[in-house]
Image (cartoon, grey):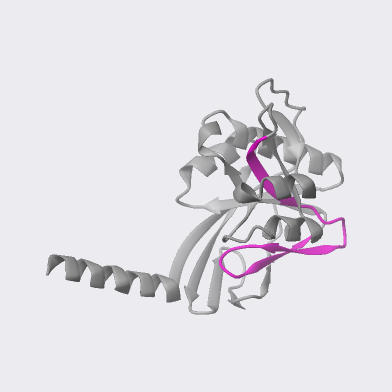
Amino acid sequence: MHGLIHSFLRSVRWRTNRWFGYQSLYFYSTFTATPQISREDYVFVEVDKEAAERHNQDLHDNGNPDIPIDRLEAGHRCFGFAEPRGDIVSWGWVSAPPSGKNIMVPWEGTLALGLSGPIAYIWDCHTLPRARGRGLYRDNLLTISRLMLEGGSESMLIYCNARNTASMRGIGAAGFRRDSVLSILRAGPVYLLLEKGANPIIAWSGKAVRRRRKLA
């Protein structure tokens, strides 16, 4: 009987989470390029199509190995650190449209984030378990930010879930400061976005959301 009750409650929770959700996101920004970082244990690389195809078992998302290639072809870029033998162990995606241009960035759930240049946005960062605890996430954020800011972007933007304390530590160590808090409520295909100092935004699944609040 106990097992049946447990299975029933788990089924109810799964169905509820499928249709309803809530989360808080912390947005961070930086405007300052840092000096170049030099490491002897890992090599900083830009992931091109050839490298993405070799590492698609790590870089792919949602079980689709074509996603990294699709992202590169859409104008997004990927940077990271590789071991001396060439295996990429830490990476992050960045979107940096030039001034006056727009790009759609995969975001929360089925939403996309409409990004306008000259703001650059870092997203979907990951470090393989065997390389964690070595400051690669921090160094990747620092290096990507330097490249984008020196390349014409006026500011960098990144966010993380409010419960992801490890990510928050790395973001803070990379010199980002918290800019705002965004709450997302979801009911089926409808999203409600709430941010202090901005009007609520209602968005539908598959649509793009544009951030209306200017960075300080």
Instruction: Classify residue 101 as left or right of residue 140.
Output: right
User: Nearest the camera: 45 or 98?
Assistant: 45
Residue 152 percent coordinates (x, y):
87, 46
- The part of the chain drawn in magenta is 87-116
Figure quadrant of residue 143: top right
Q: Residue at x 53, y 57 (%)?
A: 25
The residue positioned farthest toward the front in the image shown: 54
Q: Residue at x 68, y 72 (%)?
A: 208
From this view, report whether residue 129 is shown above or below residue 163. Answer: above
Name the spot of residue 51 as percent of width and height, x first: 74, 44
Q: Is residue 130 magenta?
A: no
Q: Residue furthest left?
A: 1
Above or below residue 165? Residue 113 is below
Q: Is residue 72 left or right of residue 201?
A: right
Q: Would you place residue 85 above or below residue 16 in this image?
A: above
Location of residue 116 (image quadrant): bottom right
Q: Residue furthest top?
A: 40
Q: Main secondary structure of the magenta part?
A: strand
Residue 81: give x, y in percent of width and height.
Answer: 68, 34
On the question of residue 166 being in view, the answer is yes
Q: Residue at x 54, y 79 (%)?
A: 190
- Residue 12, compared with residue 108, is above or below; it is below
Q: Position of residue 189 (x, y in %)?
A: 54, 79
Q: Is residue 124 visible?
A: no
